[in-house]
RNA sequence: GAGGUUGUAGCUCAGUUGGUUAGAGCAUCAGAUUGUGGUUCUGAGGGUCGCGGGUUCGACCCCCGUCAUCCUCCCCA
């Protein structure tokens, strides 16, 4: 007998976990719809050529490829080709259409871009869509990192207005307020990072600079400076970067200081303009205080301009954002992020469609909510009542009551076997069912039922109608 | 791609410098109790000690290999 197992980096979700995850999905869906976004779903697999080259060299290696079916019945020419390429296949992270032409979805953004290009004639632009589906990465799993995980994305394409950026910030605020997770939203612009590279006299080193700066939280300024040096940044450049990182104060004060430092950079001034406009739009959107419910998190002053924010993916061109949990009790990386990409659909031949989008890392949000203990308590068990099965005529009587309960919209079930009484009771207890109904000989003859409240232990014999009234939500 | 951790019952884990029949709790089943659960008590079933090789009179324990696992770095969500 081999022990059952599941593939590395995948998980089962128990009934209780699924309920909590669906609570997150439902909360996000409600907010997305409230902001006018439309649902979209794309296939689990894409053609491999759609995905390769879109996520950088590292990303390409992490794409889960699907072996072609029917290799044994290929034409002789293809078989010969495969034989010739065999050594290459064994020595490099490389594959050919003969071996694999499909791959599992790596994220939701590229499939969305593919969708927009394929359906450009059917879409009314500007187009806002949200998408909540699993994605797969052939990564080495570790804490908070899986090979199969879910993403929730909202994107708005076909408009360059910074209102879109402000709307997305607002969606983040609304979502995390509803989920009762305190967050800090970091905001930056790729244009400021480009300007910073210019300032160092090394415009082509922007990626190196941003990768190093992104680690500021983790390794501190000394670590970042070392990495910058290793990546070939001059001492003068490092000094310039330090000067910018050391700018403190409110968002407005930071932007004023940046415009002083970057006044000779067109890209820098553009970036500053983007950020200040986005923040102004956001301010107008949220001018009147949003409705707060008891226990909601006050995320009022939590949007922070942070020039060290980089974001890994290289397709971002404008404003970029990242969300981290601001509670000291929780150690977790980013739980969401996104930004503006000017030419995503250009990859598939459709030029001039600008987009901006954000993603919710729901697996991490789940872990954070678990740690903060902010899930609603009543998510535990849906079944409200269980009918004990006494067999024979009583079983028939029980089935009749069961139907009446369900017609009254009360989630109910019957123990399917006329098993020993204490076994049935133990089962109801383990399931956490609130009420147990006892339709036995006496009850049936009187056309009544005994209702036992499993929390208090209290029990009384009443009519079925009274029972329904008691149990009704 | 680099480094480390741990593999013993369905689950979580003990297991003496290497010693003869490998244990506990939980779970399951049965009974105390044929209409009363959550807290009791009694009993039962359940193990190729990850796999392969080596050292030894003797290996769950030591050595080598291998597979799996989790964690750290890289990168990311």
Image (cartoon, coloured by chain):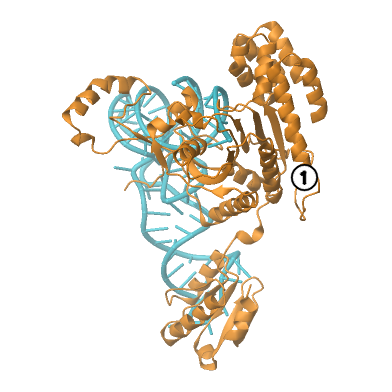
- The colour applied to the residues of chain B in this rendering is cyan
Closer to the camera in the image, A32 or B32: A32
Q: Position of residue B71 (x, y in %)?
A: 55, 32
Quadrant of the rendered image containing residue A173: top right
User: Which residue does the image show at 60% across and 85% down from the upper left?
Assistant: A465
Q: Residues within 10 Å of mark 1 (few under 14, many from 20)?
A: some
State the residue lying farthest toward the top: A235
- The colour applied to the residues of chain A in this rendering is orange
State the residue lying farthest toward the left: A76
Closer to the camera in the image, A176 or A418: A176
Residue A396: in sight, yes or no?
Answer: yes
Quadrant of the rendered image containing residue A217: top right
Q: Position of residue A6 (x, y in %)?
A: 41, 44
- Left/right placement of residue A443 relative to residue A212 reads left
Q: Secondary structure at mark 1?
A: loop
State the residue lying farthest toward the bottom: A445
Residue A249: in sight, yes or no?
Answer: no
Above or below: residue B22 compared with residue A461: above
- Left/right placement of residue A144 relative to residue A178 reads left
Quadrant of the rendered image containing residue A381: bottom right
User: The C terminus of chain A lies in which quarter of the figure?
Assistant: bottom right
Q: Position of residue A211 (x, y in %)?
A: 61, 21
- The answer for which chain carries disc 1 is A
User: Which residue does the image show at 51% across and 82% down from the upper left?
Assistant: A401
Q: What residue did someone put label 1 on?
A: A286
Closer to the camera in the image, A339 or A335: A339
Q: Position of residue A26 (x, y in %)?
A: 59, 54
User: Which residue does the image show at 58% across and 33% down from the upper left?
Assistant: A354
Above or below: residue A128 compared with residue A23: above
User: Which residue does the image show at 56% across and 38% down from the upper left?
Assistant: A144
């Amino acid at each position: 007998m081999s022990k059952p197992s599941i593939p590395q980096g995948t998980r089962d979700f128990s009934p209780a976990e699924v309920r909590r995850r669906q609570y997150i999905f439902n909360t996000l869906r409600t907010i997305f719809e409230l902001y006018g976004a439309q649902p979209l779903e794309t296939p689990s697999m894409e053609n491999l050529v759609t995905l390769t080259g879109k996520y950088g060299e590292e990303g390409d290696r992490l794409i889960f490829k699907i072996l072609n079916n029917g290799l044994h019945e290929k034409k002789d020419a293809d078989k010969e080709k495969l034989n010739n390429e065999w050594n290459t296949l064994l020595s490099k992270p490389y594959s050919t259409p003969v071996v694999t032409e499909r791959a599992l979805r790596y994220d939701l953004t590229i499939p969305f871009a593919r969708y927009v290009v394929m359906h450009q004639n059917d879409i009314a632009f500007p187009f806002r869509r949200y998408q909540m589906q699993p994605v797969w990465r052939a990564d080495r799993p570790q804490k908070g990192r899986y090979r199969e995980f879910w993403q929730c994305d909202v994107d708005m394409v076909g408009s360059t207005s910074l209102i879109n950026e402000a709307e997305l910030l607002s969606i983040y605020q609304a979502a995390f307020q509803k989920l009762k997770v305190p967050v800090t939203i970091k905001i930056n612009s790729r244009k400021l990072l480009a300007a910073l590279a210019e300032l160092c006299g090394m415009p082509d080193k922007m990626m190196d600079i941003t990768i190093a700066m992104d680690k500021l939280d983790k390794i501190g300024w000394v670590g970042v400076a070392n990495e910058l040096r290793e990546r070939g940044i001059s001492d003068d450049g490092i000094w310039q970067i330090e000067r910018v990182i050391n700018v403190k104060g409110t968002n407005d004060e930071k932007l004023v200081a940046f415009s002083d430092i970057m006044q000779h950079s067109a890209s820098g001034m553009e970036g500053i303009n983007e950020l200040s406009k986005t923040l102004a739009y956001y301010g107008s959107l949220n001018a009147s205080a949003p409705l707060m419910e008891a226990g909601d998190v006050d995320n009022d002053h939590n949007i922070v301009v942070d020039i060290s924010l980089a974001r890994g993916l290289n397709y971002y061109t404008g404003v970029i954002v990242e969300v981290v949990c601001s509670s000291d009790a929780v150690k977790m990386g980013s739980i969401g992020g996104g930004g503006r990409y000017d030419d995503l659909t250009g990859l598939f031949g459709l030029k001039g469609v600008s987009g901006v989008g954000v993603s919710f890392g729901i697996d991490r949000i789940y872990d954070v909510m678990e740690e903060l203990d902010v899930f609603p308590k009543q998510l535990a068990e849906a079944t409200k009542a269980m009918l004990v099965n006494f067999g024979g005529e009583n079983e028939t009587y029980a089935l009749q009551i069961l139907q009446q309960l369900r017609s009254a919209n009360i989630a109910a079930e019957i123990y399917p076997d006329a098993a020993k009484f204490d076994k049935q009771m133990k089962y109801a207890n383990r399931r956490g069912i609130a009420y147990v109904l006892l339709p036995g000989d006496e009850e049936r003859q009187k056309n009544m039922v005994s209702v036992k409240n499993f929390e208090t232990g209290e029990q009384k014999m009443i009519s079925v109608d009274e029972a329904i009234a008691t149990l009704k939500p």
